[in-house]
Image (cartoon, grey):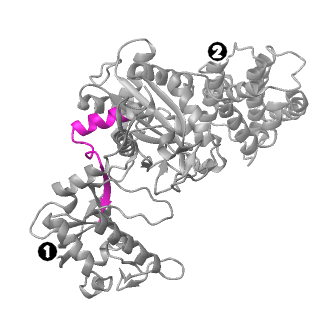
Amino acid sequence: MTILSALAGLYERMAQAGDAPRRGYSTERIGGEVVIDRDGNLVAINPKLVAEGKRTVAAPLAVPAAVKRSSGIAPNFLWDKTAYVLGVTAQKDEKGKPVLADGRPVAAQERRTADEHAAFVALHRERLAGTEDPGLLALLRFLDRWTWEDFAARACSPEVLDQNVVFRLDGEGGYLHDRPAAAQLLAGESAGEGVLCLVTGERAPAARLHPSIKGVMGAQSSGASLVSFNIGSKDIRGASSSYGKIQGDNAPTSEAAAFAYGTALNALLARSGPGPSRRALRIGDTTVVFWAETPDRSHDEEAEDWMAGLLDPPDDSESEADATLKLRATLEAVARGQKPDDPRFHPDTRVYVLGLAPNAARLSVRFWLPGTLGDFTRNLARFHEDMRLDPTAWKRLPAAWALLYETALQRKAENIPPLLGGELMRAVLDGTPYPRMLLSSVIGRIRADGIVNGARAAICKAYIQRNLKEEFPVSLDPDNTEPAYRLGRMFAVLEGIQQAALPGLNATIRDRYFAAASATPARVFPLLFKTATHHLSNLRKGDKDWLGRYFDDQMGKIWAGLSSDLPASLTLEDQGRFVAGYYHQKFTKKAAAEAVETTAGDME
């Protein structure tokens, strides 16, 4: 199934459940209502604000579908922001900041604001010409007599400035855009010559422009296009053309299908409450949305909750402890080939995952993965098995998005390598090899900042295990004969010798030599061995002779599995083995050190 047809199908199920606006409408944030009487006189302008967390925001409301705007002037039908509807905006100073009087915005009209209001008036005079509906006639009378100065003269609430507003007839509960006459006008817009829709396979009026998609991280706040065409020459009607076809004619999609996929995708991306939608998350520069397809919409939500828990596991707080343990048990059961004991899990449920990234005024599709809940759960269980490391690298189960911070300078999201988020998510969900960029970026950060933590070691281990189809040890493996792994262990021992001989150091050999030792061991290790010999000599002369013997023993056991000819250089994959070996030796040695101290106490 294609992206657009799957989204259109989602819209139909949402509409049947009452979770989506009817065709020709969209859900927008409406911050006020303009109440008028039948003669077109203003009765009141009331704010429509609701509490959302700690904020007060405009209320969501189904209104006639928003027009597509760029930098031009294009009014909406029967609603818009106050600049269009009332010709008034919040006054701003030379720096673009709102001018306040008694802590409240001041109404003003700018040159563009006047043009926007004139366009709004012209649109409604044209569209409502000949109407006999009392409410729509009242709107025309209102627009004929309204001036922007009336806003201040009537002491209208400045809270609505620059908000979207709708119209209501005094004494009635519904809005003008909900009146049957308005619905008939909107339906009349869809009349036209039919085309064979590539999404539905039915003949219907074609969409000239496709809907704007809002909510993709990094895209324009006004929205970006999932489907669009380059502007070529102008045809005889002055419309933009591409390959001789005019706008939407290049890939015929009916207005109904375009509206359906746009509405569904915007609903997936929409924020719900103070946080983001549970069906959307950010992975690097990629915004990922997912949805399920079942005969019953309530079962869709169960499957989507399941996917949300897999893609963004619960945190390690006490309130989420039970959920974390349950998810861990679920993934372990799936890894063993068992069905999880959870009523939400139906392995054959269809699930769709779409990755989108910004590209100026357009959207790029990073990946499109149709599958089943069982497939995605098995692949995510495999991902967590790949990342398993002892000592453990994290308290909570790792999310793919969290790993990307290990590849970024100063662990900032804006420094995550472009494309990496989408490629990593595809590998995790599809069970395919991890992108080589993941390993190279982690090794690059280690070389730059010298930080070798559990997350970075786990990434190296996961890459080698999956991409090279190699059974890589979860915990310290003294019998592993891979030279790079042993050299990493050896480096950890040499660092331990330095720290024992020179306690209180601010920096160790890791800070100075790790990058070079992991890339060109033959050049660096002889120097490290020479320094370690000196440190061991000092340890044996003091009261830490037992510790010197311990390190001698560790070096001997590791060296026994190495060739006397150290490799001149290590490949990127071998550098990953080096990192994992270092981590295993360094962080497992704490238990060994405790055993050594016990032995030393017995010897005294």
Q: Which residue is mark 2?
A: 469
Q: Position of residue 95 (x, y in %)?
A: 54, 79
- Residue situated furthest front in the rendering: 236
Q: Which residues are magenta?
A: 8-31
Q: Is residue 59 above or below residue 268?
A: below
Q: Amino acid at mark 1?
A: Asp
Q: Is residue 367 magenta?
A: no
**In the figure, is residue 104 to the left or right of 552?**
left
Q: Earlier in the sequence, mark 2 or mark 1?
A: 1
Q: Position of residue 402 (x, y in %)?
A: 53, 39
**In the figure, is residue 241 to the left or right of 545?**
left
Front one among 453 and 163 = 163
Q: Name the secondary structure under disc 2.
A: loop
Q: Is residue 10 magenta?
A: yes
Front one among 568 and 367 = 367
Q: Is residue 314 visible?
A: yes
Q: Amino acid at mark 2?
A: Lys
Front one among 506 and 345 = 345
Cα separation, mark 2 vs mark 1, equals: 75 Å
Q: Position of residue 463 (x, y in %)?
A: 64, 25
Q: Residue at x 64, y 41 (%)?
A: 407
Which numbered marker is on residue 37? 1
Dot 1, how many residues are within 10 Å of its Cα: few (below 14), some (14-19), or many (20+)?
Answer: some
Query: In which quadrant of the rendered view does residue 307 lie?
Result: top left
Q: Position of residue 103 (x, y in %)?
A: 36, 82
Q: Residue at x 33, y 49 (%)?
A: 272
Query: In which quadrant of the rendered view does residue 592 lie?
Result: top right
Q: Residue at x 79, y 14 (%)?
A: 561
Q: Residue at x 48, y 27 (%)?
A: 369
Query: In which quadrant of the rendered view does residue 137 lie?
Result: bottom left
Quarter of the image for the N terminus: give it.
top left
